[in-house]
Image: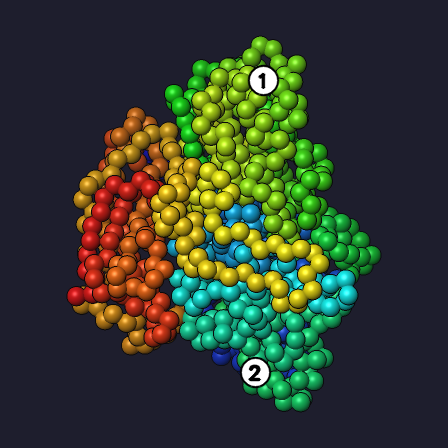
């Protein structure tokens, strides 16, 4: 067996062992309908205020629930309460936890196995810490705007890739009995004015309204949430912003009509923190749980006593309250959390105090600091592997990488050493303070995770260079580099490794798409010094690389935010013990203006409470769909692109077979409805097959991709020229050929008809194209699917 395959098998067995060896019950998940029966029986024994207690949160309300949100225990019936914790890349605000790769890195792997294993490892840590509910994964924002402050938490702007990542992550997290929360539903594409503000005259200026048409919602922004529901997500978090004029947590169209009715979501809708704006309006629109309820920052909350009052007054029916409470309890029973879930680690409360973002903890002074339970297990191994697998090789001239026969290295850039300010990105909403010196392996805000362990690039590379008996010289101050003050550098290194970074955080959008701290000038100046300059970037996704074509920049590696093993992952890649097998899950434009719709930014003195409107006029045409529609704008590096240390070829014969034929054009209820929507939509209707060969002299991972073009003539305006509808990550030995089969579901070939309110397979021929990126298409076929 190949070495890598042995390593993978060993990793799989270890993971399996550590999971099965744990005290997790093995009987879950039980079927949804059985869980609903248990939840209803449970709720039936409660009085109104206990039911309201189940749907009204708080910050850790007692010493036993030191979490960012909690549902209080009801001791009378043996319910110990629920602990909710951030976030998508690991258990934030705690010690003794792993910092996993962030969502954008995960998407860049295009690797279902790694997506699942990461989800499972995250779930294991949540479980071991006694956190019932994981506040992740995120597929909102998707990344409509390159500058979006939270894009890195999600899986990128393609709904198909994001949907697969949601699916795998949720299966992983929930496989160990921890509830997943798909967030932020819906249209939370910009941080600017994500929440309402108060004008100088005291009037309220409402949050941004994302105005999105029905088809775009279905085919783009809701698509990965449908995957999440299909995968069985326990919860969906509604967002801060408004959607089509209504606050997201009060929008019955998207919460009830779409999420609960059309997509048959059986779990509960939880509000983002402080995103609930009313009692009756939200409860009746479909909100099931207010967070953080009785301890909101503003001090105002809408469930609790107000909800009891509304039920007494009949403005919210008792049936609806029962439905809310039943929905909250259903995933708890489905995932066996009634069967011996670990008690929350009280240390999380201690760390919580010293690690608060943006506001004083209501718990300040309550908890003494206690030593943390260390739940990291062997997760560093998987984090290291994923970090390398999510690194994208964008340029590699003269085979400079992997590094061979070099012994003299220049290590340049402020992204190399340990962060000067310690083990957490504490600063909330300010990218300049505190984060200048030190490597960036995750973004800021509620999605960050504090480091119990961190292997910086400097540490790992130093070890590597020592093992080669080589030497390294360094310069970390970007200003010195930018100004060409290489005073301490002698002789000129054989290779200069320049590490750049771009910070992004919840709460504000990025000021621009640039790498920060004089990065562009630092590249130009390093390239003048060093004919072999390798640029390694740590960033949140879409970035500008105006220096990419500099001929002395011989290689570029986009390493995203890879988590705590960042140094080891990049060292593995640089010296080639592992391939940089990532592919871009977004496009890199030549200029910021090329990327698409701008963020709405209004002057701070607006007085119109309804002024903040974001019209999604581009419809589905974001990222590569936007570049396809405007073929005069070419990206610098396109969606799906990434080089390898070997080369691949694809056969010319793309064979497409219709599995179920003839097909009714319209998906209907014949086969019923289940979480995720019409069962029909999830059945395989078509397969496409292509050969891929490794034509190089070393083994490597190919990522063949399948794009589908629905006919423009028989679909309404706005149909993208092509959309991703299949991919595989396949390991090929030198010279090896494999036949790849993509399986397409009915939904993959349908568009959302806004009049019929139905998914429809269009008349005419559907185009299929296989290739190695959204621009590098090697084989095409055309088939009429509806016969
Ligand atoms: C964020 C959520 C997060 C919550 C709890 C909010 O500000 O938008 O993503 O889960 O806080 O920390």
Q: Is residue 21 above or below residue 520?
A: below
| Horizontal arrangement in the rendering, residue 527 relative to residue 774 (left or right) | right
Tell me where residue 355 appears, x and y as whole percent. 72, 50
Write down the quadrant of residue 249 in the picture. bottom right
Nearer to us in this view, 391 or 348: 391
Give above or below for 411 relative to 506. above
Dot 1: what SS?
strand
Q: Tell me, for residue 472, which label it has, or none.
A: 1
Q: Which of 742 and 212 is in front in this view?
A: 212
Q: Residues within 10 Å of mark 2 (few under 14, many from 20)?
A: some
- Residue at 52%, 57% in the rendered image: 140
Instruction: Pinpoint residue 226: horizontal percent, then vertical percent.
Output: 43, 64
Vertical position of residue 495 compared to residue 156: above or below: above
Using the image as rendered, state which of residue 144 and residue 444 is in the foreground.
144
Residue 264 image position (x, y, % from top left) = 43, 73
Give x and y (percent) for residue 153: 55, 50
């Amino acid at each position: 067996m190949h070495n890598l395959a042995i390593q993978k098998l060993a990793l799989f067995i270890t993971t399996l062992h550590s999971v099965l060896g744990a005290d997790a019950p093995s009987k879950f998940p039980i079927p949804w309908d059985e869980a609903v029966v248990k939840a209803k029986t449970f709720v039936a024994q409660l009085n109104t205020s206990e039911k309201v207690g189940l749907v009204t949160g708080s910050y850790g309300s007692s010493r036993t629930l030191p979490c960012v949100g909690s549902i209080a225990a009801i001791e009378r019936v043996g319910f110990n309460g629920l602990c909710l914790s951030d976030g998508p890349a690991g258990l934030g605000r705690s010690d003794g936890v792993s910092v996993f790769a962030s969502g954008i890195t995960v998407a860049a792997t295009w690797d279902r196995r790694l997506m699942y294993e990461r989800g499972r490892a995250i779930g294991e840590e949540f479980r071991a810490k006694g956190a019932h509910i994981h506040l992740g994964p995120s597929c909102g924002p998707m990344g409509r705007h390159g500058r979006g402050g939270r894009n890195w938490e999600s899986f990128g702007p393609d709904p198909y890739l994001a949907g697969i990542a949601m699916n795998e992550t949720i299966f992983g997290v929930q496989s160990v009995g921890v509830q997943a929360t798909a967030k932020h539903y819906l249209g939370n594409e910009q941080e600017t004015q994500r929440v309402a503000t108060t004008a100088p005259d005291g009037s309220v200026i409402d949050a941004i309204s994302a105005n999105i048409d029905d088809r775009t919602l279905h085919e783009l922004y809701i698509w990965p949430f449908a995957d999440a529901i299909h995968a069985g997500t326990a919860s969906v978090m509604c967002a801060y912003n408004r959607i089509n004029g209504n606050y997201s947590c009060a929008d019955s169209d998207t919460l009830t009509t779409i999420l609960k009715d059309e997509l048959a979501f059986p779990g509960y809708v939880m509000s983002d923190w402080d995103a609930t704006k009313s009692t009756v309006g939200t409860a009746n629109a479909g909100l099931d749980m207010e967070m953080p309820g009785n301890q909101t920052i503003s001090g105002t909350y809408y469930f609790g006593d107000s909800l009891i009052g509304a039920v007494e007054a009949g403005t919210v029916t008792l049936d609806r309250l029962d439905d809310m409470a039943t929905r909250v309890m259903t995933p708890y029973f489905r995932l066996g959390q009634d069967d011996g879930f670990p008690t929350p680690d009280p240390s999380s409360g201690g760390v919580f105090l010293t690690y608060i973002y943006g506001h004083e903890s209501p718990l300040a002074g309550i908890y003494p600091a206690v030593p943390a339970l260390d739940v990291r297990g062997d997760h560093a191994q998987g984090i290291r592997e994923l970090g390398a697998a999510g690194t994208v090789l964008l340029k590699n001239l003269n085979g400079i990488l992997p590094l061979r026969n070099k012994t003299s290295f220049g290590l340049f850039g402020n992204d190399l050493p340990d962060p000067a300010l310690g083990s957490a990105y504490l600063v909330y909403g300010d990218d300049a303070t505190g984060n200048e010196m030190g490597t960036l392996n995750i973004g800021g805000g509620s999605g960050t995770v504090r480091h119990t362990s961190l292997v910086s690039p400097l540490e790992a590379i130093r070890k590597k260079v020592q093992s080669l008996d080589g030497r390294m010289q360094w310069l970390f101050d970007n200003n010195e580099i930018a100004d060409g003050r290489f005073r301490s550098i002698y002789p000129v290194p054989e290779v200069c490794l320049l590490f750049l970074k771009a910070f992004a955080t919840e709460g504000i959008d990025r000021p621009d798409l640039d790498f920060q701290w004089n990065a562009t000038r630092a590249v130009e100046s390093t390239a003048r010094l060093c004919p072999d300059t390798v640029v390694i970037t740590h960033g949140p996704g879409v970035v500008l690389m105006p220096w990419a074509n500099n001929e002395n920049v011989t290689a570029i590696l986009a390493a995203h935010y890879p988590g705590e093993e960042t140094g080891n992952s990049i060292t593995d890649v640089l010296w080639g013990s592992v391939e940089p097998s990532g592919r871009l899950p977004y496009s890199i434009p030549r200029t910021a203006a090329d990327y698409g719709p701008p963020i709405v930014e209004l002057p701070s003195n607006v007085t119109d409470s309804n002024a903040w409107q974001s019209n999604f006029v581009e419809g589905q045409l974001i990222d590569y769909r936007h570049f396809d529609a405007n073929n005069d704008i070419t990206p610098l590096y396109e969606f799906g692109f990434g080089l390898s240390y070997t080369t691949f070829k694809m056969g010319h014969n793309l064979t497409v077979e219709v599995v179920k034929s003839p097909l009714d054009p319209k998906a209907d209820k014949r086969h019923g409805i289940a979480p995720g929507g019409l069962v029909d939509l999830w059945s395989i209707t078509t397969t496409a097959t292509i050969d891929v060969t490794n034509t190089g002299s070393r083994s490597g991972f190919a990522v063949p991709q399948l794009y589908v073009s629905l006919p423009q003539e028989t679909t309404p305006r706005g149909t993208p020229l092509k959309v991703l509808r299949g991919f595989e990550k396949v390991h090929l030995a030198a010279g090896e050929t494999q036949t790849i089969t993509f399986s397409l579901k009915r939904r993959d070939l349908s568009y959302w008809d806004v009049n019929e309110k139905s998914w429809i397979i269009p008349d005419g021929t559907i185009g299929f194209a296989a290739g190695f990126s959204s621009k590098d298409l090697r084989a095409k076929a055309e088939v009429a699917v509806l016969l």
